[in-house]
Image (cartoon, rainbow, N blue to C red):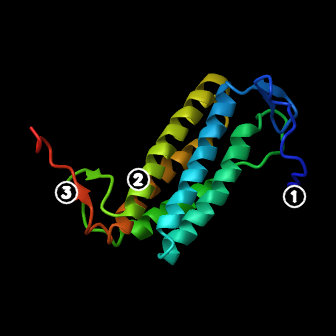
């Protein structure tokens, strides 16, 4: 159980923060950058949920994702050595794959790239997808530089999540019928 009695501690006033292990690290470090990007992603998914509130199935998926993103942040925030930590597990990635397949099964086939838009919900989900890709890039950069054999399920989760958010954006566009398609060279 997490208990937060005091919100400010002043511990970070000098540009440092503490990991789950108590280790003090720079706020500019790769690990902190990676879980910070995941935190932003969670906030953007929360905003997308406001736009998809009328669809109980999408809302349930996004609610699970928000919870998973806290797990993922904890995974990235915890060093590998000697720690019993909350980690993303393969089952969470497999669940995303099943949800992608389920949502995608009701969509029309794509004939072009999709431009973000069509509906407010779709645009919000595309925004979440792009923030997810940024979080993935930060997590990959951190893992490659500092922990090359760790956090593999977390990286898989982020990669699959961006796919789910793309499919969810199409689903929110009247199951793809309201997608705005790219027309190569149309404005030349």
Q: Looking at the rendering, which quadrant does residue 94 occupy?
A: bottom right
Q: Is residue 35 left or right of residue 140?
A: right
Q: Nearer the viewer, mark 2 or mark 3?
A: 2
* Image quadrant occupied by the N terminus: bottom right
Residue 45, given in percent of the width and then of the height, sits at 54, 56
Q: Is residue 131 above or below residue 63?
A: above
Task: Say few, some or many: other residues with alpha carbon within 10 Å of mark 2 (under 14 / 14 to 19 / 20 or more).
Answer: many
Q: Work out how far the residue at label 1 is from the one at label 3, CA to CA, in angstroms.
A: 48 Å
Mark earlier in primary sequence (1, 3)? 1
Q: Residue 54 vs residue 64: left or right?
A: left
Q: Secondary structure at mark 2?
A: helix
The residue positioned 53% from the left and 58% from the top of the image is 47
Residue hosting label 3: 111
Assign a secondary structure to mark 3: loop
Left or right of 69, for residue 159: left
Instruction: Give the labeled residue for mark 2.
Output: 126
Name the residue: 33% across, 67% down.
173
Let me know if residue 89 appears in the view.
no
Q: Secondary structure at mark 1?
A: loop
Residue at horizontal 62%, vertical 54%?
90
User: 27 or 90, which is in the foreground?
Assistant: 27
Q: Between label 1 and label 3, give the one nearer the viewer.
A: 1
Q: Residue at horizontal 52%, vertical 65%?
A: 50
Real-space CA distance between mark 2 and mark 1, rounded to the nearest whole angstrom = 33 Å
Q: Quadrant of residue 10?
A: top right
Label disc, if present, on residue 1 of the rendered structure:
1
């Amino acid at each position: 159980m997490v208990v937060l009695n005091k919100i400010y501690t002043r511990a970070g006033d000098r540009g440092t923060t503490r990991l789950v292990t108590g280790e003090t690290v720079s706020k500019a470090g790769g690990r902190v950058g990676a879980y910070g990007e995941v935190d932003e992603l969670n906030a953007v998914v929360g905003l997308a949920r406001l736009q998809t509130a009328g669809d109980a199935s999408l809302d349930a998926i996004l609610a699970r994702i928000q919870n998973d993103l806290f797990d993922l942040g904890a995974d990235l925030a915890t060093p590998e050595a000697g720690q019993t930590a909350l980690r993303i597990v393969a089952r969470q990635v497999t669940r995303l794959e099943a949800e992608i397949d389920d949502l995608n099964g009701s969509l029309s086939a794509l004939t072009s790239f999709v431009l973000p838009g069509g509906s407010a919900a779709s645009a919000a989900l595309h925004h979440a997808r792009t923030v997810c890709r940024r979080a993935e890039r930060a997590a990959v950069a951190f893992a490659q530089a500092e922990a090359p054999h760790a956090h593999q399920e977390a990286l898989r989760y982020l990669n699959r999540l961006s796919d789910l958010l793309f499919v969810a954006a199409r689903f929110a566009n009247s199951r793809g019928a309201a997608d705005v398609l790219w027309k190569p060279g149309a404005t030349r």
